[in-house]
Image: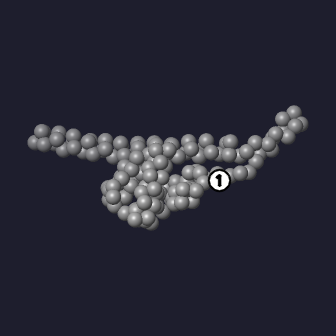
Amino acid sequence: MENKLMQSTVKQRIKSILRAKKIQIPVLSEGDENLRRTLFRQINEDTALTISTVVFILDKFPDVSAEWLLRGQGEMFKHTNHATIQTQNGGIGNTQNMNTFTEPIDLLRTEIAAKNEQIKVKDDQLRTKDDQIAKLLDMLTK
């Protein structure tokens, strides 16, 4: 029973990641229908969550903390770079946390990647429609 509760909690965290990243399972599965079905069943239904699905999620979202995903400890996103930048401003040292710059850029990269995947799916759908139209036109001209 405890395992089922833990899986349910991890599934909820995966859903939180997808919401935070504004990514849906079809985009995440990159057009792989078997993967889409597997992810949907394991994340949204009563199918057991496999370790390969958890690893897949962590691989897809390297900025997500495994500790948070699996144990609920810490923050959802890792703070990957705590280096500081020294700038000179009129001879006075001004230190800023590198995260000020890298986290928004990483978020934008993730959003761009997600949009690119959505565009890829739409392109595939358009190609399918173009093929269907070509076949219909071919049938009409025979």
Q: From this view, report whether residue 77 is shown above or below residue 90.
A: below
- SS class of the residue under badge 1? loop
At horizontal 56% and vertical 51% (from top left) the residue drawn is 76
65 or 102: nearer the viewer = 65
Q: Which residue is mark 1?
A: 80
At horizontal 45% and vertical 56% (from top left) the residue drawn is 9
- Residue 80: give x, y in percent of width and height: 65, 53
- Residue 56: give x, y in percent of width and height: 46, 60
Q: Report whether 131 appears left or right of 89.
A: left
- Residue 71: give x, y in percent of width and height: 54, 60
Of all residues shown, which one is farthest toward the top? 90
Of all residues shown, which one is farthest toward the left? 142
The N terminus appears in which quarter of the rendering?
bottom left
- Residue 10: give x, y in percent of width and height: 46, 57
Q: Report whether 86 appears left or right of 20.
A: right
41 or 120: nearer the viewer = 41
Question: Is residue 118 something one can see in this rendering?
Answer: yes
The C terminus appears in which quarter of the rendering?
top left
Classify 10 Å Cα crowding around label 1: few (below 14), some (14-19), many (20 and above).
few
At horizontal 41% and vertical 42% (from top left) the residue drawn is 119
140 or 22: nearer the viewer = 22
